[in-house]
Image: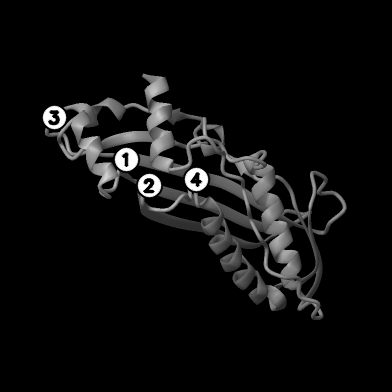
Amino acid sequence: MKKIAVLVLCLLLTACGSVQTWRYTSEPKSYEKPKIEKIIVVPPFRDIRQNENTQKYMALAWIPLVPYSQLVEANTPEGLPLALANFGTASETLAKTTAEELNNASIFKNVYFSFNTEESPLILEGTLKDFKLERYWTFYGLSLPGDLLWFLGFPAGKAYNTITIQYRLIDKKGREFFNKEYTQKEDWLQGFYYGNENYRLEKLVKKINMELVEDLSKLDKKLK
């Protein structure tokens, strides 16, 4: 059953035989004078996701008249068979993208990633609540012969991505200057003729980081 699931997941992701590489590109570095003369450290995020990837209802779509079923629900998609190459650990990788994006925006004097928070007066904590993907597949109620429709251009299934990160800016005394949760979602059709983007998680991370940049740029009065 698991071998079949991996094969079908391969087909739905339309990239069988290759692994998608994590590619996050920050905005170009701005060399304007920082609005806020403060240094911020971004430590690895706290990861509170469920550590579970499931294929509970995969076989339901094989039953005649059942329109679709869930192929996979991945709370930790980096652990899937078709994993993201060069992704690393979510708690570190996502914290690094945030630090780089903020530093390039030149809102603050310096923003950097580090495990050591002792040297910086301000700490931007992140809590990773969702970094999730769900995949559904369909045989159009025809059981296995329904997969022939995929070759005719019908969607093989649908994908859903959800990312939720909560950010908190504090100083060494625990005083809080900022606290906000960000959620981004996306869904799209999958199949042989629907492109080859497997995960598309970078796009949602980018949106969250750009929202964070905008929000933190408004803290100049609070941090002076």
Identified at 56% across, 67% down, the residue is 211
Looking at the image, can residue 73 be seen? no
Please rate how many residues cluster around mark 2, counting C-alpha atoms within 10 Å: few if below 14, some from 14 to 19, many from 20.
many
Q: Residue at left 79%, top 80%?
A: 32
Alpha-carbon neighbours of circle 3 within 10 Å: few (<14), some, or many (≥20)?
some
Label pair 1/2, CB-CB below 8 angstroms: yes
Tell me the amino acid under the disc marked 3: Pro
Q: Which mark's residue is nearer the viewer, 1 or 4?
A: 1
Q: Please state if 14 lies on the left or on the right of 131 as rendered.
A: left
Residue at mark 3: 64
The earlier-in-sequence mark between 3 and 1 is: 3
For marks 3 and 4, give the CA distance.
Answer: 34 Å
Identify the disc placed on residue 159: 2
Q: Which residue is mark 1?
A: 136
Residue indicated by mark 4: 130
Give the distance between the C-alpha atoms of the residues marked 4 and 2, in whole angstroms. 15 Å
Left or right placement of residue 67 versus residue 87 in this view:
left
Whole-percent x and y of residue 224? 77, 75
Q: Amino acid at mark 2?
A: Ala
